[in-house]
Image (spheres, rainbow, N blue to C red):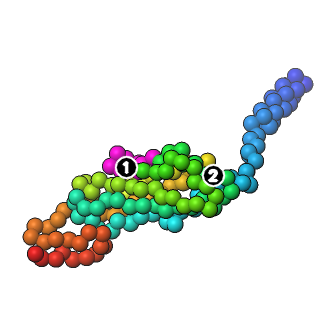
Amino acid sequence: MKKVLVSIGVFLMMTFAAFAQNATTQPAVNPNAPVISFEKTTHDYGTVTKGGDGTCEFKFKNTGVEPLVLSNVQASCGCTVPDWPREPILKGKSASIKVKYDTNRVGPINKTLTVSSNGKEASIQLKIIGTVVETPTGAQMPVNNPGAAPVAK
């Protein structure tokens, strides 16, 4: 009986020791790290006709101290192509990420862009939303005007 109790005690001590070894420490936050501040994180195209203008822009500013470097901007699919600045964005300076969505695809737009940087937030999600519709025969629909009725020619 004594051996069983000792075995259980050793097992429990080893279990606690294993959990103590797995305790993670948070890395120190750099108080001077760059901070990326976007004017908006979602762009709503509204209703766009097939083949219409699928460009938009996400403007941002480095509100941190150190230079901000965007290492990657990844779109959730190949129908969305981002273009971002490759040079460092200095403290207090602004720049933008330009996005081109392929409006030859009829249907809802609901895409995500992941912005990776050396900022305090290493990864930020941007979204584009809207709807691409066919142009009605004999009518012309205004581009980027949600809820607008077709205008007869």
**Residue that label 2 marks:** 67
Image position, residue 138 (x, y; %): 9, 70
Residue at (85% x, 28% y) in the render:
10
| Dot 1 crowding, Cα within 10 Å, few <14, some 14–19, many 20+ | some
Q: CA distance from mark 1 to mark 2?
A: 25 Å
The residue labelled by disc 1 is 81
Residue 75 locus on image (x, y percent): 42, 48
Q: Quadrant of residue 106?
A: bottom left
Q: Earlier in the sequence, mark 1 or mark 2?
A: 2
Left or right placement of residue 1 versus residue 128 in this view: right
Residue closest to the eye, 70 or 49: 70
> Is residue 77 located in the magenta-colored stretch of the structure?
yes
Q: Is residue 99 left or right of residue 13?
A: left
Q: How many marks?
A: 2
Circle 1: residue type: Val
- The kind of residue tagged 2 is Pro
**Numbered range of the magenta stretch:** 74-82
